[in-house]
Amino acid sequence: MSKARNRFQGVRHRFRPGFVVWIMVMWCMLMGELSWANVFAGLGVGLLIVFALPLPAMPVTGVRISYGALIKYLFIWAWELFFASLKVSWLALRPQEVPKQAIVEVPMRLENEFVLSVAVMLYNLQPGGTISDIDIANRMLTIHILDAGSDAAIEREINAVAKLELAMIRIFERRHA
């Protein structure tokens, strides 16, 4: 009876109704039509994903969010997104050759893996650079820079990562870097 109870606890711990509903909504949007068949199919896909492909628990202990700093940074991030989009659009539309690109390694001082994953997500959502590898043990990010035509452009991108890191520390880790 103990094994069955432990197995049930694992299933109960893994089941996330909000996530299943989210997958169902995404399924209906993907199908382009809200119908009972799509709702039930989306629920089925959501349940299948939750139970067949369980994700490990994300370590969030010790994370305290500074909501003021978070809201301030989200406005800064949206502003930077706007200008990064303009820059990449110009690089695509200008009548010149494709700019030089670079791959660089940048250290990160973030202590929490959850905070590191948020930082990587925020960086990857901005056009112009992509984090292609994360070395968790050494806290090193490998970054592909789209416009690396000069040392100043590469340095600017490395400084952008440092600013992102500082913002994540202020928002989530509440220590001064």
Image (cartoon, grey):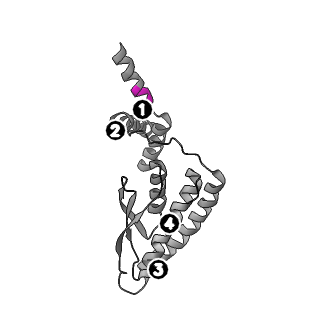
Q: Residue at x 48, y 42 (%)?
A: 22
Q: Earlier in the sequence, mark 2 or mark 1?
A: 1
Q: Residues within 10 Å of mark 2 (few under 14, many from 20)?
A: few
Q: Earlier in the sequence, mark 1 or mark 4?
A: 1
**Picture coordinates of residue 80 (x, y %)?**
55, 69
Q: Is residue 32 visible?
A: no
Q: Earlier in the sequence, mark 2 or mark 4?
A: 2
Which range is magenta? Answer: 10-15
Q: Earlier in the sequence, mark 3 or mark 4?
A: 3
Q: What whole-number distance in Å separates the C-alpha atoms at marks 1 and 4?
A: 35 Å
For the residues carrying marks 2 and 4, which lies nearer the camera in this image? 4
**Quarter of the image where one finds residue 139:** bottom left
Q: How many marks?
A: 4
Q: What whole-number distance in Å separates the C-alpha atoms at marks 1 and 3?
A: 45 Å
Residue located beneath label 1 in the image: 14
| Image mark for residue 90 | 3
Residue located beneath label 2 in the image: 53
Q: Is residue 162 visible?
A: yes
The residue under label 1 is which amino acid type? Arg
| Image mark for residue 160 | none
The residue under label 3 is which amino acid type? Trp
**Quarter of the image where one finds residue 51:** top left
**Picture coordinates of residue 8 (x, y %)?**
39, 22
- Residue 174 magenta-drawn? no
The residue under label 2 is which amino acid type? Leu
In this rendering, position of residue 68 left or right of residue 175: right
Residue located beneath label 4 in the image: 162
Q: Residues within 10 Å of mark 1 (few under 14, many from 20)?
A: some
Q: Secondary structure at mark 3?
A: helix
